[in-house]
Image: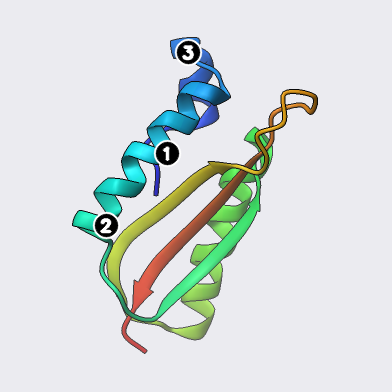
Amino acid sequence: MVPVTPPIMKELNINGAIVGCMVAAFAVTQLIAPPPAGKCVLIAYEFDPETYWESYRKLVKRIIQQQFTILSDVYELFMPIHYSPRRSEAYLVEMKIRILN
């Protein structure tokens, strides 16, 4: 999970290169204090402001349908899909919630 989302990037006027450095720093942090291990319900998608909340709702709906017991908050991973300067920026978002079942 990376604590930066595209709306914040725009608000802070930062680009993918800066986010890349933040991802690297965050990766080191994950080695020191990783998120809890265990069984999770997960959804991953290419970021688009419109699909962010739609994907979150799908994740929650699945948990409710399967009657899973939730053990954690939502862990979110946000990272560039590529680092090419010749392509438009695109980001992968992965949301996961630890479950008991």
> Which residue is disc 3 drawn over?
11
- Dot 3 and dot 2 residues touching (CB under 8 Å): no
Q: Is residue 29 above or below residue 33?
A: above
| Residue drawn at 39 percent across, 81 percent down | 39
Q: Is residue 82 above or below residue 72?
A: above
Distance of label 3 from label 2 (alpha carbons)? 29 Å
In-image side of 46 versus 65 (left or right) = right
The mark closer to the camera, 3 or 1, is: 1
- Dot 1 and dot 2 residues touching (CB under 8 Å): no
> Which residue is disc 2 drawn over?
31
Distance of label 3 from label 1 (alpha carbons)? 18 Å
Front residue of this view, candidates 36 and 85 = 85
Residue farthest along the bottom direction in this orientation: 101
User: Which is more N-terminal, label 2 or label 3?
Assistant: 3
Residue 72: x and y, percent? 27, 66
Task: Estimate how packed mark 3 is, as few (under 14), some (14 to 19) or many (20 or more) residues with alpha carbons within 10 Å.
Answer: few
Specify the label residue 23 is tagged with.
Answer: 1
Q: Amino acid at mark 3?
A: Glu
Residue farthest along the right direction in this orientation: 86
Judged from the image, the secondary structure of the residue bearing numbered disc 1 is helix
Q: Is residue 79 above or below residue 36?
A: above
